[in-house]
């Protein structure tokens, strides 16, 4: 009986440790989701927009600000804010670092362990590193992933300093961060989540279980089942809450439509699918006409009612397969899968007919201006959105309550 009891406690201890590793893994995965979302937004939306402004002369060519153009600076800042929020909620800190062997900022300088991993990622094609490590006597789950191979677009800021924006060189100098090679990983994501917070909570359950199981060992090992169910229930609750938070972060709280983050994420995948299967894809950008007048005359509560009603009309007239989102303010976006110019124009006409039928709320007549664009070969979501947005502004300039399709 003593041997059976010892074996039972040993198995439970291993289960507790495995539980702690799973919780730490969830913490790291949440951070990676946030990091990838921030990086994609920066690379696919923010940078293309700033480069467009430079091309059009709205920004001078040598402009460079790490606060808006450095993915490393932005990611480190966002994760720093997230760390503060976790601390305020009493949650454990997660170590995050973009470690490089050619860092401009000393904060990103890889240590000896990270340098060794980075060499393996470049020389041995190591795709990921996961291991439980001890730091100053405390157990951590450590995860390292390659930052991504250096591509042609990276060379503007990481190639020859003579080709880089003058403001970048003026701020950081020409000694570090340059002369990178395409195809090489210049940095890795270094993440470390502590196991102690999860071990402590689970060990409390383990002690209670051990005492109880000792008392009822003769009657069986029922407490094992109960203990494991408790751990599974806690893990399930964490997963459910994480999923609820993820869904809330992708939904516009006022209209119930997808928000801009969800639209950019899903839209990027749809463009890749359309290009892979050679299918048409179109985008409509819609803006409520004279919306400021509604807020100024009847107040913001009535303005919110108008946005909810317009969102309902767009969703009602769109196809079930269309991706409808609130882009921001009084602007909406509709991505039409497997649809060309004519299908997009037909949807715009349906929306206009419904809004022009009569007052939308009370005696308020609401109209929208619509701009459309059809996906071109090798075009990214940011460029497609810019063309549709420009067409929408032309619709406003031509008198509103109409639709203009991009012809360039």
Image (cartoon, rainbow, N blue to C red):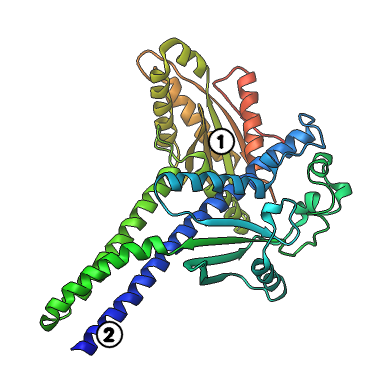
Distance from label 1 to label 2 (Cα)? 64 Å
Q: Residue furthest front?
A: 136
Q: Which mark is residue 77?
A: none
**SS assignment at label 2:** helix
Residue 314 percent location from the top left of the image: 45, 33
Q: Residue at x 43, y 41 (%)?
A: 251
Residue located beneath label 2 in the image: 7
Q: Nearer the viewer, residue 193 or 351?
A: 193
**SS assignment at label 1:** strand
Residue 13 percent location from the top left of the image: 32, 75
Q: Residues within 10 Å of mark 2 (few under 14, many from 20)?
A: few
Q: Residue furthest left?
A: 219
Residue 16 percent location from the top left of the image: 34, 71
Name which of mark 1 and mark 2 comes first in the sequence: 2
Residue located beneath label 1 in the image: 284
Q: Nearer the viewer, residue 242 or 56?
A: 242
Left or right: residue 265 versus residue 183 is: left
**On-image quarter of the C terminus:** top right
Q: Nearer the viewer, mark 1 or mark 2?
A: 2
Q: Residue at x 61, y 24 (%)?
A: 395
């Amino acid at each position: 009986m003593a041997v059976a009891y010892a074996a039972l406690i040993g198995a439970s201890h291993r289960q507790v440790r495995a539980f702690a590793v799973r919780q730490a893994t969830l913490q790291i995965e949440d951070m990676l989701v946030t990091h990838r979302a921030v990086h994609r937004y920066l690379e696919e939306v923010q940078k293309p927009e700033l480069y467009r402004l430079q091309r059009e002369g709205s920004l001078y060519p040598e402009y460079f600000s790490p606060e808006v153009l450095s993915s490393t600076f932005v990611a480190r800042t966002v994760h720093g804010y997230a760390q503060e929020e976790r601390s305020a909620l009493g949650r454990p800190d997660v170590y995050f670092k973009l470690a490089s062997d050619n860092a401009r900022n000393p904060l990103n300088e890889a240590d000896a362990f990270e340098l060794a991993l980075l060499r393996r990622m470049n020389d041995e094609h190591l795709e990921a590193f996961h291991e439980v490590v001890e730091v100053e006597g405390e157990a951590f789950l450590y995860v390292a992933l390659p930052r991504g191979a250096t591509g042609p677009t990276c060379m503007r800021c990481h190639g020859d300093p003579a080709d880089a924006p003058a403001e970048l060189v003026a701020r950081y100098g020409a000694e570090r961060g340059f002369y990178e090679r395409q195809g090489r990983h210049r940095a890795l994501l270094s993440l470390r989540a502590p196991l102690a917070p999860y071990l402590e909570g689970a060990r409390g359950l383990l002690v209670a279980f051990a005492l109880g199981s000792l008392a009822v060992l003769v009657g069986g090992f029922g407490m094992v089942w109960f203990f494991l169910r408790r751990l599974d229930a806690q893990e399930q609750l964490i997963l459910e809450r994480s999923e609820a938070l993820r869904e809330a972060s992708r939904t516009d709280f006022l209209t119930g439509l997808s928000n801009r983050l969800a639209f950019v994420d899903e839209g990027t995948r749809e463009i890749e699918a359309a290009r892979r299967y050679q299918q048409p894809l179109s985008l409509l950008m819609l803006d409520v006409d004279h919306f400021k007048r509604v807020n100024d005359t009847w107040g913001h509560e009535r303005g919110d009612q108008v946005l909810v009603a317009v969102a309902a009309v767009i969703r009602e007239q769109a196809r079930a397969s269309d991706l409808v989102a609130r882009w921001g303010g009084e602007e909406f976006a509709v991505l039409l899968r497997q649809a060309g110019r004519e299908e997009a124009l037909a949807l715009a006409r349906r929306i206009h007919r419904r809004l022009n039928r009569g007052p939308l709320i009370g005696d308020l007549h609401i109209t929208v201006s619509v701009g459309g664009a059809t996906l071109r070969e090798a075009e990214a979501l940011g460029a497609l959105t810019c063309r549709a947005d420009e067409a929408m502004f032309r619709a406003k300039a031509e008198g509103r309550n109409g639709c203009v399709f991009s012809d360039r």
